[in-house]
Amino acid sequence: MNPNRNRPLNLATQIAQALHYEDKKTGSVVPPIQHAATYARDHDYNIRQPFWYRRDGNETTEHAEKMIAALEGAEDTMLFSSGMSACTAVIEQLPTGAHIVVPEVMYHGVLAQIQLYAAKNRLVVSYYTAGKIEELSDAIRPGETLLVWVETPNNPNWEVTDINAASNLTRDAGAKLIVDATATPPTMTRALELGADYSFHSATKYLNGHSDVTAGALSVKNVDKDWEELGLIRKLQGTVLQSNDAWLLIRGMRTLHLRVTRACESAIVLAEYFEGHPRVEKVLYPGLKSHPGHEIARRQTDGQFSAMLSIIIKGSEQDAIRVASNCDVFYPATSLGGVESLIEHRKTVSGDGFPVHERLLRLSIGIEDVDDLIYDLERALARTFS
């Protein structure tokens, strides 16, 4: 390597150093927490840019936003107080009667809100099966559809939708594409580079990675009037991410590359181990060669696939619940993307109205020793069926 030749820093280096933060006064390498809710104007009564009141953001939130924008290759990023508040802003920005296209199965909270808006005639909704580009194409109404929603890999069945193909269809129809790639953070999937207009992440999950923050991140390919209106909605609703959570998010992102790599390596080992297991009917994981979306997932995730998988066990629904309860290492808890591994009976959490297999267990793989995770799940299965 030629030391005299200028080269850009690797993104992993930039994020590990919080964009090479260094306090000019003290030399601190850790960004501070700015708590101020209001800011004094200057002697001419002008705003000291860019902040004047907390609902617009502050230095701490902005620093976290800049880190995510760098990860996403985005022109801009906005942080919200939760993933749901970010998605709500996107929905609220649409005019009354707007036609949108969404998958039949997606994160149940967002799906429930979209269905609520549709029931009140706020939205007109068409559905498609996740991963089925032909169905997506049929659902889009050129010149009428305003927004297409893609979640990939799709929670909790982990179908894979081709983002580039979806973006071509969306652009040709004059609509915008939002991609929820929460299960594959931007260390592996950069949705904007694949053609999305908006990239969404529940930053509660992998971006933070420590199960101690609730946050949502929206990133944009090109800033426009719609994006500016989203910022206004965030301000009016008061849903900007607060300082302590923004600081924790900054801290969590500094180990993002290490955490995600370790978790993904363990996930494929676990998926391959339980594929064909006598107590397991099916393993749902894009990293398996048997998965119909394997090759698309490989391209979209740089071969890392994901640290999320689901297993459909044999037996009854109560057997599935008992397996989750019988684990000692996996926590029987909701969420994903933390350093600790979680197991969840999805139907119990999402409710009877959500279309999910009654024996499906969703697994979020953390950074523990993978042999301990395999042993724990084996023991839970043995306890359940003994």
Image (cartoon, rainbow, N blue to C red):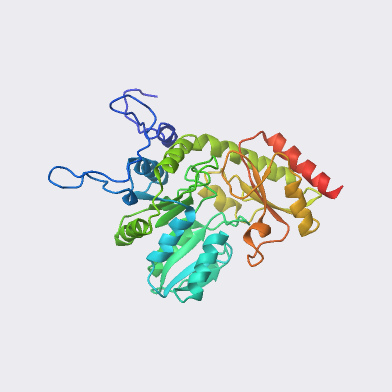
Q: Residue furthest top?
A: 3
Q: Quadrant of the N terminus?
A: top left
Give the image quarter of residue 63: top left
Residue under the point 56% across and 51% down: 297
Q: Position of residue 151 (x, y in %)?
A: 52, 58
Q: Nearer the viewer, residue 335 or 2?
A: 335
Please indicate whether residue 320 sits to the left or right of residue 145 in the image. right
Q: Position of residue 48 (x, y in %)?
A: 21, 44
Q: Nearer the viewer, residue 336 or 197?
A: 336
Residue under the point 22% across and 43% down: 40
Give the image quarter of residue 245: top left
Please indicate whether residue 228 sits to the left or right of residue 43 in the image. right
* Vertical arrangement, residue 256 with respect to residue 289, above or below: above
Q: Residue furthest right?
A: 386
Residue under the point 43% across and 56% down: 86
Q: Nearer the viewer, residue 146 or 193?
A: 146
Q: Nearer the viewer, residue 267 or 247?
A: 247
Residue under the point 72% across and 61% down: 358
Q: Position of residue 365 (x, y in %)?
A: 63, 42
Please indicate whether residue 222 sits to the left or right of residue 260 in the image. left
Query: Is residue 133 at all visible to an observer of this figure?
Result: no
Please indicate whether residue 52 sits to the left or right of residue 188 in the image. left
Query: Is residue 23 at all visible to an observer of this figure?
Result: yes
